[in-house]
Each structure stands twice: as C-alpha cells, then as structure tokens.
C-alpha cells in the first residue's frame, strides 16, 4: 500500500472518531432529557406541558420577540432552542399565574433557559429594542 494512502486514512479516521463522538454526545443529552424523573415525567414532557398550557397566552408581538432572540442559534437547532426557551417561559407563566406572556417573562425565561454565552446577544437585542434590562441583572449571575 502506498504511503500517501496511509496519510489520507489517518486524518479521515480521526475525523470520523470526532464526528461520531460529537453526535453521540448530543444524542446522549437528548436521551437523558427524555428519561422520566421521580414524578414519572421527563424534562421534555414538562416542556411540552408548559408550552401547551400557555399557548393561548402568546401574542404575535411576543412570538416575534422570541424569534428574534433565537436568531444567533444555527438554523438546524433553532426550533429546539425555541421550544426549550418557550417551555421555560411557560413554566414561569404557570407558576406566576400570568394572564398573558410579557416581555419580562420572555427575558427571564431566556436567561434561565440559555447558557451564559447567549446572554450577550440578549443584552444587545434588548438595548437595540430600547428595553431596560437592568431589572434582570441579578439573573445573569
């Protein structure tokens, strides 16, 4: 076998190991979210419950704000991110017995449902829309 074939196969082999490990990691995370907890429901079941329970509370304006906030997420993962954030917003709305989804609920739910690296985008978006984000400063910690 010529040496050049070996030099092609080694990077390809390393790439495939990395590619499969990355996919396996995300599949395992999804699997763990689908596992039932002590109450018999999984995180995904609760997320769907809160979304369905609060679906009628969303206005078109609030849906547009949520859509704008998930813009930095790659298109392939945007729907999943939007459902996760909407589930957290719905949970807050149910706990507070809200009669509609407000900007405050959206901002708090976004902060609680996303990693810290996404908070910079939130602050930039709120400043661009001239929404005061200082009341939520303690949630960024």
Image (cartoon, rainbow, N blue to C red):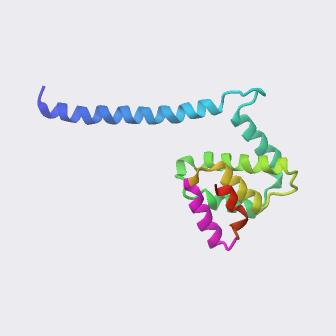
Task: Report the magenta stretch's main SS.
Answer: helix
* 67 shown above or below 18: below
Specify the quadrant of the image occupied by residue 65: bottom right
Residue name at image x 79 percent, y 56 percent = 58
Residue 12: x percent and y percent? 29, 35
Q: Is residue 60 visible?
A: no
* 100 shown above or below 126: above
Which of 55 and 44 lies nearest the eye of the viewer? 44
**Image quarter of the C terminus:** bottom right
Which of 89 and 56 lies nearest the eye of the viewer? 89
Give the magenta part as a residue range.
117-131
Residue 138 shown left or right of residue 101 in the figure: left
Residue 120: x percent and y percent? 57, 61
**Image quarter of the N terminus:** top left
Residue 89 shown left or right of residue 16 in the figure: right
Residue name at image x 26 percent, y 36 percent = 11
* 60 shown above or below 5: below
Residue 52: x percent and y percent? 79, 44
Q: Is residue 138 visible?
A: yes
């Amino acid at each position: 076998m010529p040496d050049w074939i070996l030099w092609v196969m080694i990077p390809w082999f390393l790439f495939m190991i990395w590619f499969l490990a990355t996919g396996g990691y995300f599949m395992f995370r999804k699997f763990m979210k689908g596992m039932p907890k002590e109450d018999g429901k999984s995180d995904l079941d609760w997320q769907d419950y809160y979304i369905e329970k609060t679906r009628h509370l969303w206005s078109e304006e609030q849906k547009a704000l949520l859509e704008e906030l998930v813009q930095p997420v790659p298109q392939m993962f945007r729907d999943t991110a939007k459902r996760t954030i909407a589930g957290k917003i719905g949970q807050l709305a149910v706990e507070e017995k809200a009669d509609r989804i407000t900007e405050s609920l959206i901002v708090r739910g976004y902060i609680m449902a996303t990693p810290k690296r996404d908070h910079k985008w939130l602050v930039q978006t709120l400043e661009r829309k001239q929404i005061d984000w200082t009341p939520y400063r303690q949630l960024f910690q």
